Image (spheres, helix red, strand yellow):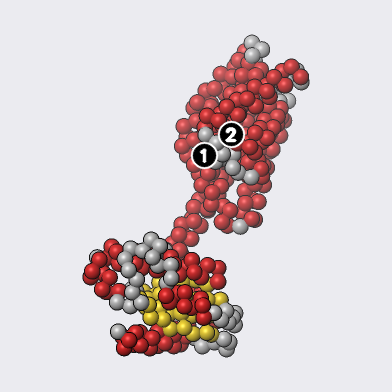
Amino acid sequence: MAFLQFLIPFEMLIFNLITINFCCHRKYSLFKTVLGLAGFTAAFYLVLIFVFRYTMEGDARAALTGFLYLIPFRFLYKEKPSLLFVITCMCWVYTLGIVSLSVQAAALFWPDQGLLSVFIFSTLLFFGTIVPFFSRMVPKYVFILENIPFFGKNWYRCLALSTCVNFFLLLLVHIYLLSAEPSFMNLAILATLLSAVWISYLILYMVVLGSVQMNRLKKAALQDPLTGLGNRAMLLEDLSVLIRSDSVFSILFMDLDRFKEINDRYGHAIGDEYLKHFGEICSRTLQEQGRIYRFGGDEFVALYYGPIPDEMAERLKECREWDTGAPCPFNQVSAGILICEPPHKSCEDILRQVDQLMYKNKCEHRLEK
C-alpha cells in the first residue's frame, strides 16, 4: 500500500486548493486554473518521487513542501504574494489539523493498519467537516480578507501574524505529538487548539462585521440616498474641518432654476435623473480639487480647496458637459460664490452669506427672463 504514502498528502492538497480557489480571485477561467495547478502537481509529485525519494511519514513535511504552491498561485490568482501566503496558512491549518487528528486517532484506535487507518480517518473527517467549513468558515474568512484592508495596515498585519502563528503552532504540536504515546489527551490537545484557532477567526469576523456595519450606518447618515453625494450633515462636518484648520477655501451655493418645471413636464423619475446628472457633472468638474454636496431639494453646495478660478466657477454654473447622457434639456443654475479666508466665521454665517449671494443671482435671472 505504498500508494497511500502519496494519497494522504494528495487528499490534503485537493482540499487546500479548493479552499484557496474559494478565497482568491482567479486571473483566468476555472478550466485554465485547474489545468495549471494539475500540471504543477504532476511535476511536483514526479520530482518528490524520483528525485527526492519522498515517503509519507506523517511528519508534516507535506505541509511544508506544499508552500511551493505559492509559485503557481502567484501567476493564477490576483492577490499579492503576502496575502496568498496568509490564505495558504489558513488553508493549511484546516487540512493539517484534519491529518494531525487522523494520525493520533489511527494510532489510538487502529494502530495495526498504519497509513490505511490514517487515510480512513482523514477521509471521514474531511467529508464530515467539508459542509460546515465551506458554508460557514470560508465565507467568514473571505469577508475578513475583503474588509480588513479598510481598517489600516496594522489590522492586516495582525491578521497575517495570527494566521501564520496558528499554522506553525499547530505544526509544532503535531510534530511533538508524533513522538508521544497515543492517548486521549493528545486528541484533546489537538481538538482544543483547533477550536481556539477557529474561535479566534469567529471573534475577528464579529469585530470586522460590527465595524463594517457601523461604517455603513455612518455613511448612510452622511450620504444623500438619491445622488450618492454628501448630504447637509457631511457638508457641515467638512466645512467645520476647513474652518478649524484655518484653510482658504471657496464655497458655491447652487440652486437649479425652474426645477419644478422639469418635474411637471417630464415626471419625477426624470427629475431624479436630472439631479443625479447635475451632481455627477459637478463631481467630475471638481475632481480632487473640491467636493459637491446635495444641500436639499434642488440645492447643491460645492466646496473648493483654495480660491476658485473664474473658469472653474463658470464651468460649474454653466454645466458645460450636460448634453452627454442628459435626461432632458438643462435650465439655468443660480449660484452664489464666496471665497473664505481666516479668520473664519461660523458655518451658519458662511452658509447664510453665500445663500444670500445665490438668491441675488436668482433674482437677476428672473429679471433677465
Q: Nearer the viewer, residue 167 or 305?
A: 305
Q: Regarding mark 1 in the picture, which secondary structure is present there?
A: helix
Q: Regarding mark 2 in the picture, which secondary structure is present there?
A: helix
* Marks 2/1: CA–CA distance: 11 Å
Question: Residue tagged by mark 1?
Answer: 138
Residue type at numbered disc 1: Val
Question: Which residue is painted at 64% across and 10% down in the image?
Answer: 1
Question: Which residue is painted at 58% across and 31% down in the image?
Answer: 16
Q: Residue furthest top?
A: 1
Q: Nearer the viewer, residue 141 or 349?
A: 349
Q: Eyeballing the image, is 74 above or below 318?
A: above
Q: Nearer the viewer, residue 158 or 343?
A: 343
Residue type at numbered disc 2: Tyr
Q: Which mark is residue 94?
A: 2
- The answer to whether residue 229 shows anywhere in this view is no
Whole-percent x, y for residue 256 in the image: 35, 76
